[in-house]
Image (cartoon, helix red, strand yellow):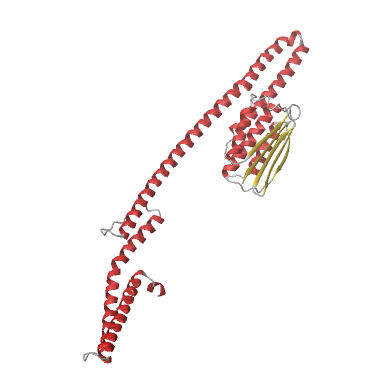
């Protein structure tokens, strides 16, 4: 009820009543002045009371009617403006309001219409940008897939293919020496076995890149443990694993971290000649810590920038930075390799 009497319609009625009150007071003052100064026969105290009472009564009725009537159009236009603003708030930017009067409400309506037009254009621009971003993401993904395939093809040719060719040549040489010089043939067969083992290790490392990027609904810790278990069965590496089970990371973060671990272990298998690998994956406060190290050959980071591992290291660094994290690598010849990654989460 209080809210209703504070509406603009009753504000109009109150304004008319204030005008009536001032008019009545002015009339009363005028009549009293005439009565005191001139004392006309037609004017006395009773007639003054009747005049004031009658004018107040009629004025009140007229004020209520005039205020209610004149505020009706104003309230209706305010309701239109209110509905328009509500539609804008709900995301409907196509609605418009038009008034024929040339006043403040018409100017406000025109400004709101212009705002709706601007918001509508901005929505179209955002939709267009979203479509362009989606197209760009698809193109980038396609380019990344092509680049990854080309890299795997180069690695297969440079490493496995050449090693298999060397195995063929060594095997043929051993066969030729088998009858004449069996001791030499035996040494050559041992070299064949060593080369075959190296080719097998190289192939297993390359196959890590062919594993699915997604964890298939598994937690990151579960996926990493399965990966390590598989590598233990297929390689001679000794793993030291320290992983928090309850990491609670976003799907994107889990996929990037999993791929980073795959890349790092692939480099270790192919290039490090290591016997031990340590992997720590911990979450402290709002940061994820990933540490991977090995006791392998190591390398000179500053000098060996053209190593085959450089592409993998670049990829790991880009993945960490894409998640807003940092990537640090430490290595020296004969001292192994140490990778530390910190990612906010």
Could you say where residue 279 lies in the image, as x and y percent from the top left? 70, 38
Instruction: Give the quarter of the image for residue 171.
Output: top right
Q: Nearer the viewer, residue 54 or 109?
A: 54
How many marks the image carries: the answer is 0
Q: Nearer the viewer, residue 202 or 317?
A: 317
Could you say where residue 193 lies in the image, as x and y percent from the top left? 72, 21
**In the displayed structure, does residue 295 sit left or right of residue 96?**
right
Instruction: Give the quarter of the image for residue 201.
Output: top right
* Extreme residue toward the right, this view: 183
Q: Nearer the viewer, residue 65 or 261?
A: 65
Is residue 252 shown to the viewer in this render? Answer: yes
Could you say where residue 206 lies in the image, as x and y percent from the top left? 62, 28
Vertical arrangement, residue 311 with respect to residue 249, above or below: above
Residue at 43% of width from left, 41% of height from top?
A: 129
**In the displayed structure, does residue 190 sit left or right of residue 70?**
right
* Extreme residue toward the front, this view: 37
Vertical arrangement, residue 97 with respect to residue 32, above or below: above
Residue at 61% of width from left, 31% of height from top?
A: 314
**In the displayed structure, does residue 50 sit left or right of residue 228?**
left
Position of the N terminus by quadrant: bottom left
Residue at 66% of width from left, 23% of height from top?
A: 199
Could you say where residue 264 lies in the image, as x and y percent from the top left? 66, 33
Residue at 63% of width from left, 35% of height from top?
A: 262
Is residue 95 shown to the viewer in this render? Answer: no
Q: Nearer the viewer, residue 187 or 270?
A: 270
**In the displayed structure, does residue 111 sit left or right of residue 245?**
left
Instruction: Give the quarter of the image for residue 67.
Output: bottom left
């Amino acid at each position: 009820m209080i809210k209703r009497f504070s509406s603009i319609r009753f504000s109009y009625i109150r304004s008319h009543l204030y005008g009536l009150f001032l008019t009545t007071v002015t009339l009363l003052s005028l009549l009293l002045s005439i009565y005191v100064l001139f004392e006309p026969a037609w004017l006395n105290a009773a007639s003054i009371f009747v005049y004031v009472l009658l004018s107040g009564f009629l004025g009140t009725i007229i004020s209520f009617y005039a205020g209610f009537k004149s505020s009706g159009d104003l309230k209706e236009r305010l309701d239109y403006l209110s509905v328009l603003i509500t539609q804008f708030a709900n995301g409907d930017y196509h609605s418009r309001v038009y008034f024929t009067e040339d006043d403040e409400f018409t100017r406000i309506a025109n400004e709101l219409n212009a705002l709706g037009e601007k918001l509508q254009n901005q929505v179209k621009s955002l939709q267009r940008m979203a479509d362009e971003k989606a197209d760009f993401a698809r193109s980038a993904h396609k380019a990344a897939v092509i680049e990854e395939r080309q890299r795997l093809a180069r690695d297969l040719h440079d490493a496995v293919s050449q090693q298999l060719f060397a195995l063929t040549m060594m095997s043929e040489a051993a066969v030729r020496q088998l009858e004449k010089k069996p001791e030499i043939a035996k040494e050559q067969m041992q070299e064949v076995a060593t080369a075959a083992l190296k080719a097998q290790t190289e192939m297993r490392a390359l196959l890590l890149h062919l594993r699915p990027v997604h964890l298939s609904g598994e937690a990151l810790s579960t996926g990493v443990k399965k990966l390590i278990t598989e590598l233990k069965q297929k390689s001679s590496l000794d793993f030291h694993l320290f992983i928090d089970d309850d990491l609670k990371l976003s799907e994107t973060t889990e996929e990037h971290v999993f791929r980073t671990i795959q890349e790092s272990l692939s480099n270790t298998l192919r290039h490090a000649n290591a016997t031990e690998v340590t992997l720590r994956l911990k979450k402290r406060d709002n940061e994820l810590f990933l540490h991977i190290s090995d006791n392998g050959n190591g390398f000179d980071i500053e000098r060996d920038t053209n190593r085959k591992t450089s592409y993998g290291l670049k990829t790991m660094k880009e993945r960490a930075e894409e998640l807003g994290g940092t990537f640090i690598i430490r290595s020296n010849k004969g001292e192994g390799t140490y990778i530390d990654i910190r990612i906010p989460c």
